[in-house]
Amino acid sequence: MERRDFLKGAAVLAVAPSLFDRAQAADDLPDVSSQLHTFPKDFLWGTATASYQVEGAVHADGRGPSIWDTFSHTPGKTYQGETGDVADDEYHLYKHDVALMSRLGVKGYRFSIAWPRIFPEGTGTPNPKGLDYYKRLLDQLQEAGIEPFCTLFHWDLPQVLQDKGGWASPATGRAFAYYAAYTVGQLSDRISHWMTINEFDSFIDAGYGSGEFAPGLRLPRRELMQTRHNAVLAHGLAVQAIRAAAKRPIKVGLAEDISGTMPAIDDEVHIRAAQIALREKNAPYMTVILEGKYTERYLRGLGADAPRFTPEDLKIISSPIDFLGINVYTTQEVIPADSEPGYLVVSRQASYPHMASDWLYINPQALYWTPKLVADTWGVRTLYITENGCSADDVIRPDGRVLDTDRIMYLRNYLTQLHRGISEGVPVRGYFLWSLLDNYEWTSGYSKRFGITYVDFQTETRTPKLSFDFYQHLIRTNAVV
Ligand code: BGP
């Protein structure tokens, strides 16, 4: 018996082509390997930043204070008390940064507008000087042939609105829609792609739940759940306000750090489990925005702490969007389970590798599975990767170079998986690398470097890293190998 099996194995081996045979046969074939890794012709390569993280100039031209100014100036809240007061000083160095983007060859720049530059008081009278800065930036981008993708809220809430309750108050959502309408009315002639809000759970759950981010509150669960609801409602109100205010056809979306899931094993039951987990893990934000309802399990789990809402709220929250932006850094493996809820999100073992930030677990398949599952689950037809990238322990060598091969390894592997998805028809239209520059990384201050350009924060000198050259080459060839 054993011997027969052995013979069977041997027979299979004998007919399988050897590596040598395959190499010979490949001579007669077109160069499939490079074709396999080429992106679509109109694929939009870009980079991303956010106002408080790069602009600095926090007192310039009438900008009002934001909750991040207050929070970062509160002792003990950020790494070594670091603040975004100066950051990359992009407010003054934007020409330089656009030139850097031109050199890189990107076709898109995702940036955010600081609400307190436009409305220092949160609402009411706009500040034309604040708006002028973005006009100057947009002129520069236009000259360079770089398409702007604009986020209206990347966490720098005007402090005056926080003083009245911030996102815990529904009035903030109304003020947000007002700010969105005004800004879009002023800039829709130059900007076609608008994102309402960046990463709900980062500024809501970390800002009003764990207190780790500005405004640093720890609300009771019931209030936190209502605050989550206020935020998605604010998104919906803004979508409607943007459409009404636009002076020409524009595209509206958002940028969400969707809680990614992937099957631990690529079979049907695991894929199904990953899909169910995706809906549940994103129930407070993405799921309700795309489905117009909270999942039963989410509401049941919250019991008396569930948010209160009306059917009209749900309609507003799920106002149709034109594209979905997802920020993808990592993901979590899922396996099926016999008992409720039918899946298990596997907690990572201590040996799971991560980049310089301890939360940034390396899982290149995130860029395959997250867009794929999102598209399959919700029928999304236009996706952008609005952030992907990593922190690394970059050092300037004596020769002045930064040879960040670990970041290149990360990007190469993630982008190979993105390519895999696109080649199977996953509708990802563009990719924005986080980030163009090392910048102010919130509570990590300047200690975590995510840029493909090294920034000396004493002198504001920019030094492109090796990963900059890698990305430049990738964009030029429109391929990853
Ligand atoms: C995303 C944010 C970015 C950026 C990035 C890096 O969550 O949208 O603004 O900061 O993550 O993460 P972090 O700075 O939290 O380490």
Image: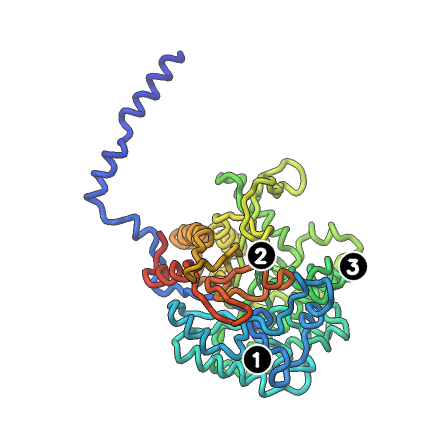
Image coords of residue 167 (percent x, y)? 71, 69
Mark 3 residue crowding within 10 angstroms, few (<14) / some (14–19) / many (20+): some
Question: How far apart in space, not on screen, are marks 3 and 1 (Cα)?
Answer: 33 Å
The residue drawn where x is 70% and y is 64% is 229
Q: Earlier in the sequence, mark 3 or mark 1?
A: 3
Q: Which amino acid type is shown beneath numbered disc 2?
A: Ile
- Depth check, mark 1 against mark 2: the one in front is 2
Q: Residue furthest front?
A: 398
Q: Nearer the viewer, residue 52 or 147?
A: 52
Query: Can residue 204 be seen?
Result: no
Precedes in sequence: disc 2 or disc 3: 3
**Amino acid type shown at disc 3:** Arg
Q: Secondary structure at mark 2?
A: loop
**In-front residue for pair 168/137:** 137
Percent x, y of residue 470: 38, 58
Residue where numbered disc 3 is placed: 222
Q: Quadrant of ligand 1?
A: bottom right
- The answer to whether 25 is drawn above or below residue 397 in the figure is above
Q: Which residue is mark 2?
A: 258
Label 2 close to label 3 by CB (< 8 Å) = no
Name the residue type under label 1. Ala
Disc 1 marks which residue?
Answer: 244
Residue 133 visible in the displayed image? yes
